[in-house]
Amino acid sequence: MLRDLPEHQNTERPPHGAAPSLHVQLNDIHKQFGRFTALAGIHLDIRQGEFVSLLGPSGCGKTTLLRILAGLEHADRGQIMLHQRDITRLPPAERDYGIVFQSYALFPNLTVAANIAYGLKGRREDRQRRVDELLDLIGLAGIASKYPAQLSGGQQQRVALARALATSPSLLLLDEPLSALDAQVREHLRHEIKQLQRKLGVTTIMVTHDQEEALTMADRVVVMNHGVIEQIGSPETIYRKPATRFVADFVGQCNWLSGTVLSPGYFRLGNAAIAAHSLAHHPTGRQVEVFLRPEDVILHPRWEAGPNMALGELKQLELLGSQYRMTLQVADWGGITLQADLNHHQLASLNFRDGQRIPVQLPANCLQCFSTEHSE
Ligand SMILES: Nc1ncnc2c1ncn2[C@@H]1O[C@H](COP(=O)(O)OP(=O)(O)OP(=O)(O)O)[C@@H](O)[C@H]1O
Ligand SMILES: [Mg+2]
């Protein structure tokens, strides 16, 4: 199990000096549903004001973990600390959080104002003022008297967010808050939620199975699989330096190259010796799986001798929107199929003709390795 990776200590500090204090600590959380293990020893520390995303495939235990934190589900083992206080056995109402679920969980028979004010106590005028403040905050002043059915999905989720924030909780829990929305609204709300979170400084834990959402919104991403944490790190670390094959595959596209270590820093791929810096300390003869992101493959307009170069035969060219994805087959590298991403300008500068083979290069510093044998 990976606890905090060293680089997370470098994430931003508040402008006025002191390091943020620990807010949430999950220690060794286990959960069984009958004979099924949903969570198998989760350790996670979250700092005050941090935005953490729990990312993983369906069924990996994200919602279960969030529900345990919220007190809506009980862990079989483990401890939950909030500001160094043990809250493992506290009921939900005493845990000081706001929560937003995937489906709009607004009360259909209450107006927007009544929905937002639901958890508020105190004098009528104070509640009214707070509702106005929150409507302003989410950019929906003027809809106070509408009913949920009269709102779009995006507006309903904003209201749900306002309701979750109404009591100024110190912790905001979001379970796939954007997944029921269409792509454009989703992207827009991503920015809004992130901005709001920054402005309020509220510690936020968001569950998602959408890697783009996690990478764009979170300060730190927690990648989960089968009830365990595979990696915790900044979005950049998760994407550029995945700790396991699962993380590499789940977060982004990969080219996988299977080969044998020839000498420190080199592996055999087909007939070629390929240099890879990550293999500097691997013993000769070791079977390795090396990976490379499609955007790291270099394509040259003309052949020139160089390290890790070969000619690739173009098999397919797809437009992905802002970029193209090329599929190339490389005979000299044992006939492997490589995917290379490039933008419109790069494609134009290649100036290739149908049937022409394209010079391909693998940058030695971008080839990363996971050993397929456990002898280290
Ligand atoms: N109350 C329950 N009873 C039995 N099994 C459950 C219960 N709640 C969850 N599970 C199982 O535990 C596993 C984890 O569920 P969980 O809802 O935490 O997954 P998730 O990561 O949130 O997935 P998704 O992305 O689909 O929402 C699943 O296999 C699920 O079927
Ligand atoms: Mg879920």
Image (tube, grey):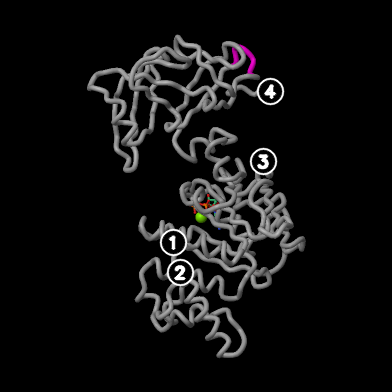
Tag nearer the camera, 2 or 3? 2
Residue 79 vs residue 258, the one in the foreground? 258
Contact, mark 1 vs mark 4 (Cβ under 8 Å): no
**Where does the magenta region start and end?**
282-286
Residue hosting label 1:
189
Q: Amino acid at mark 4?
A: Glu
Give the label, 1 or 4, closer to the camera: 1
Residue type at the position of mark 3: Leu
Label 1 close to label 3 by CB (< 8 Å): no
CA separation in Å, label 2 and label 1: 8 Å
Q: Nearer the viewer, residue 374 or 37?
A: 374
Which residue does the numbered mark 4 point to in the structure image? 376
Residue at the far left: name it. Answer: 354
Looking at the rendered structure, the number of numbered marks drawn on it comes to 4
Residue beneath disc 3: 2
Specify whether 35 is left or right of 109: right
The local crowd at label 2, few if under 14, some if 14 to 19, many if 20 or more residues have their Cα within 10 Å, is: many
Which three-letter amino acid code belongs to the residue tagged 2?
Arg
Mark 2 vs ligand 2: CB below 8 Å: no
List x then y, in percent, for residue 299. 38, 24
According to the image, label 2 marks what residue? 158
Mark 1: amino acid:
Leu
Crowdedness of circle 3 by 10 Å Cα count: few (<14), some, many (20+)? some
**Marked residue nearer the N-terminal end (2 or 3):** 3
Tell me, yes or no, whether the two marked residues, 3 and 4, touch with CB atoms within 8 Å: no
Q: Residue at x 60, y 35 (%)?
A: 243
Task: Please state the horizontal and vertical placement of residue 198, each as a whole percent of the image.
Answer: 57, 62
Q: Is residue 154 left or right of residue 128?
A: left
- Write down the quadrant of residue 76 in the picture: bottom right
| Residue 42 x %, y % | 66, 48
